[in-house]
Amino acid sequence: MFYKDTQGEKVVRRGQIVSRSLRERTKAYFQDLEKRGIIRKSRSDWRNPIRAIEKPNGEARVVSNLMGLNDIVEKDLYTLPTIREIIQATQGSTVFSVVDLKEGFYRIEIKKT
């Protein structure tokens, strides 16, 4: 995907409440990311909501709904397969895996402005 000029249009979405049980873990998670230089504090007008969910091992997973960005990026020519296509491709399979690509997202560099 490529950013396209929005002539000053911003994505601003209301935040979501993080449950009390996950609040401290979420705070520690972001402090760790900041300490490692993965994120930094920002005063940007752009906002996307985050929420924390509990993983099966008890850790907090922070997720964000970035659908508001869809209108301001140019789509790649290659499209990801649909769920239906994936189900058809795996039909008859007997072994499946669950993979947590821990921190894989942090390998994508974002252009500084």
Image (cartoon, grey):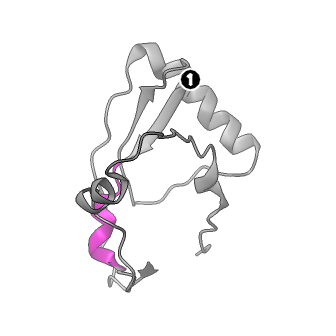
Residue segment shown in magenta: 65-73
User: Residue 16, relative to residue 71: is it above or below?
Assistant: above
Residue at 53%, 17% in the rendered image? 58
User: Residue 16, relative to residue 47: is it above or below?
Assistant: above
Could you tell me which quadrant the C terminus lies in? bottom right
From where the camera sits, is residue 89 visible? yes
Question: Is residue 17 in the magenta section?
Answer: no
User: Residue 41, relative to residue 77: is it above or below?
Assistant: above
Q: Secondary structure at mark 1?
A: loop
User: Residue 100, relative to residue 18: is it above or below?
Assistant: below
Figure quadrant of residue 30: top right
* Furthest-left residue in this view: 84
Dot 1: few (<14), some (14–19), or many (≥20) neighbours within 10 Å?
Answer: some
Image coordinates for residue 39, horizontal then vertical, percent: 64, 51
* Furthest-top residue in this view: 21
Image coordinates for residue 100, horizontal then vertical, percent: 56, 40
Figure quadrant of residue 108: bottom right
Query: Which residue is under mark 1?
Result: 59
Residue at 40%, 46% in the rendered image? 93
The one of 92 and 34 positioned closer to us in this rendering: 92
From where the camera sits, is residue 40 visible? no
